[in-house]
Image (spheres, rainbow, N blue to C red):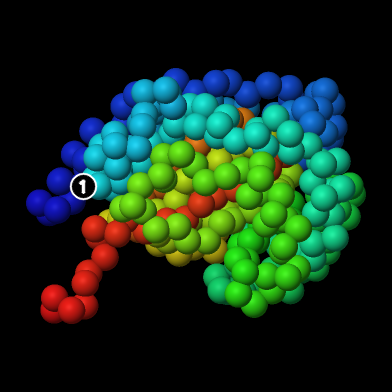
Amino acid sequence: AGAVRLHAARLSSLRQSSACGTNQSASNAFHKVAAPPLGGWSTVTPEEFRVAAINDCTVIHHEQLDTEVFLRDFVALRRPVLIRGGARYAPGFLSLSKQYLADVAGDVVISAATIPYPEDFGDPESRETVSTTLGVWLRRQMTQLVSSSGTPLYLFAVVEREGHQGHENFQPLRDLLSKEVPTPPLLNSSEFELGNMQFAVGAAGSGAPQHYHTHAINLLLAGQRRWWLFPPPHSSLSRQHALKYFRLVHGSASVAAEEREALECLQERGDAMYVPTDWGHATLNTMEVLSTAQEFVYTPEETDGELL
């Protein structure tokens, strides 16, 4: 009981500083195009998603954050934070249009599925996974492919590094992202060891169920994304699509914010989200999105086997 009270107190203390933007443009279907595109990316938000986010995550402007503060106040404490403008350092924030991606990396073979890693999660709709190319996905399939349960398919991949299986296929995309989305400056420290880079493109209504992994900084280069963050006592691996979770949280039977197990916030284009290791997180794309994520290890957390 004491641990539960301690967790509740911690979650309550994290439910502070919040001021996320509001949604725009309505649509009654996931793939209806209306608002003027930005680099070819639709800025339509389906009407269902115009519900205001609870916004109880810690929010900080990127100019108030450097590597030392980031490490001391967030990484070392395993404290998530939404960094306003944290992705604007990347040239790709302005340059990565749909056309540019298709021209440079359109031949990269990649999979789209109901959720990332559907087989690992035992997703019954994993059989609906589609192997495609990035160019075909951007030009046509992203706005057309929907699963049998009604959720848009989501293109998500680990951009394999040289020496890893499949790296030749990803070479054009990896080279493009190295140029347009270099390593976040906040990770310029000898205490960080870089891991996988993830790449995602999806329509409004796509997303990822709750899961967890090592530390990661998630950059939103186009669109808008809603996050739910679950502290380690409540983190888990789930097959429940984020769209279904959204409807549970914001439906007629929704519960009060202080009774929920998760923090919630809204990431806008140009923002970065830091998710600590072992924190569960689910994401729902509320517009068409383009995003990357850099996973990393905080080396002081690693155990030196020679000392055991």
> Which of 282 and 62 lies nearest the eye of the viewer?
62
Please state, as top left, top right, bottom left or bottom right, where the N terminus lies in the image.
bottom left
In the rendered image of this protein, does residue 74 appear above or below residue 144? above
Image coordinates for residue 87, horizontal then vertical, percent: 55, 34
Q: Which amino acid does label 1 sit on?
A: His
Total labels: the figure holds 1
The residue sitting at 84% across, 55% down in the picture is 106
The residue sitting at 68% across, 21% down in the picture is 24
Whether residue 203 is visible: yes
> Which of 233 and 202 lies nearest the eye of the viewer?
202
Image coordinates for residue 23, horizontal then vertical, percent: 63, 24
Local packing at callout 1 (Cα closer than 10 Å; few below 14, some 14-19, many 20+) is some
> Which of 147 and 42 lies nearest the eye of the viewer?
42
Q: What element carries label 1?
A: helix
Q: Residue placed farthest to the left in the image?
A: 2
Image coordinates for residue 49, horizontal then vertical, percent: 63, 33
Q: Is residue 238 rendered to the left or right of residue 75?
A: right
Whether residue 230 is visible: no
Q: In which quarter of the image is residue 117?
A: bottom right
Image coordinates for residue 22, horizontal then vertical, percent: 58, 21
Q: Mark 1 points at which residue?
A: 7
The residue sitting at 72% across, 64% down in the picture is 170
> Which of 175 and 94 lies nearest the eye of the viewer?
175
Q: Is residue 43 rendered to the left or right of residue 93?
A: right
Please state, as top left, top right, bottom left or bottom right, where the C terminus lies in the image.
bottom left
Q: Quadrant of residue 157?
A: bottom right
In the rendered image of this protein, does residue 220 appear above or below residue 275? above
In the rendered image of this protein, does residue 16 appear above or below residue 156? above
The residue sitting at 36% across, 32% down in the picture is 66
